[in-house]
Amino acid sequence: MSKAIIIGGGVIGLFSAYYLHKSGWEVDVLDRGDLSDNCSFGNAGMVTPSHFVPLASPGMVEQGIRWMFNSKSPFYVKPSLNKDLLSWGLKFVKSATKKHLERSAGGLRDISLLSRDLYHEFEKDAGFDFGLIDNGILMLFKSPKVEEEELHMVEKATNLGLDAQYLTPDECHKLQPGIELDILGAVHYHCDSHMYPNMLMKGLVKYLEAEGVGIHRNTEVTKIIHDGKNITSVLTEDNEYTADSYLISGGSWSPGIAKLVGLKVPLMPGKGYSFMVHEPVKKMTIPSILCEARVAVTPMNGSIRFGGTMEIGKINKQVNMNRVKGIVESVPKYFPDFKLPVPDQKDIWFGFRPCSPDGLPYIGMSGKYNNLAIATGHAMIGLALGPATGKLIADALNGQQPVMDINMFSPFRYE
């Protein structure tokens, strides 16, 4: 039996463990934390084939510059002379082109559809409920400019074979008649799903441990040993772990891990915030994205999760209340009867999405080492792409033909 060491126990690492274990591997997962609050827990819980546009896309540079002067804006890059940020920024600018969007759309669609289907297979196999619902998502907009953009996206989505429908405000209201709306219109992406991430993550860890996968909490890798083109072991403060193959899936911490073996994985953490509000009457059944505000609103387990912002900068534990207020203030502009108080700081979740400069994840073999794979850089769609990434990594380590073309996700495309 072959053995794998996975460095990082977020949704990507855990689903990689799941598919490797299913294909006969012995697996150990090493995580620097206690697996109770990583980036996969607090996100919007959406599985989104509709998100076929990478973060690095036309217009984002210009829009990002405007947003930099607004402390409540959805996207912010903290000015810094940090060489990693400068290098990342230059690559981002170079990638934010129409050509890159056109090249990426099909691949992002394919991996998202694969992941959606695998979630349903996993739900049956694992036998626990994590709130997976196929109600689609609503893209709500208020301005003619964004309406024009969304209609253009509907055309692109339809050309990509995705099920998307333009809705008038009245048509949108009929879907959830108990909710007041103040919008110009919406697009309903029937191809999307949503879930409760907290239930998924806790259940997935429990399932893997019951299956014999080793989950090692508070176990930070400090050194990686290699012999030529093969990794031979990884060291922590008090242990050495050996295996046949290794995977770096440490989210926003992946560049530091990769650096231990001389690899460069261009990545910056993008801090996001979310909070929950109890909704006992359960009027909302379809998640929404507030287009102009870039805020996600998702019904979960008798509550609603509100989340957003992308703050590119160093990892830190500070809560920027202005950014949280930006989320709070945007919601009643679309849902007038949702008058939200600013949550207490203790009730605000934040996490760091690993953002590659071109907006595409890194998935595959490292290139430099025969037995090292990398899976990170999923930004805001890590939960959405968890099963597909895990399956593709298992295929790679098993030496099998991947179920889809993953060349655009090459971990060494910047080498």
Image (cartoon, rainbow, N blue to C red):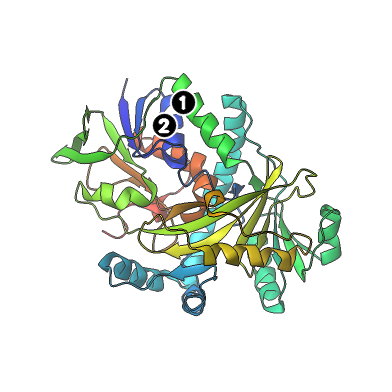
Q: Which mark is residue 394?
A: none
Q: Is residue 74 left or right of residue 222?
A: right
The answer to whether residue 308 shows anywhere in this view is yes
Q: Residue 79's quadrant in the figure?
A: bottom left
**Sequence-first tag of 2 and 1:** 2
**Mark 1 burial class by Cα count in 10 Å: few <14, some 14-19, many 20+:** some
Q: Residue at x 69, y 75 (%)?
A: 148
User: Can you identify the residue that label 1 sits on?
Assistant: 208
Q: Is residue 356 above or below residue 92?
A: above
Q: Where does residue 412 sit, x and y in percent of width and height?
A: 30, 54
Q: Where does residue 250 sit, x and y in percent of width and height?
A: 36, 45
Q: Is residue 53 left or right of residue 236?
A: right
Q: Residue at x 62, y 60 (%)?
A: 342
Q: Could you say which is closer to the camera, residue 409 or residue 359?
A: 359
Q: Residue at x 68, y 63 (%)?
A: 331
Name the amino acid, label 1.
Answer: Leu
User: Can you identify the residue that label 2 sits on?
Assistant: 17
Q: Could you say which is closer to the camera, residue 187 or residue 364?
A: 187
Which quarter of the rendering shows the C terminus? Answer: bottom left
Q: Where does residue 410 sit, x and y in percent of width and height?
A: 36, 52
Q: Could you say which is closer to the camera, residue 329 or residue 184?
A: 329
Q: Residue 232's quadrant in the figure?
A: top left
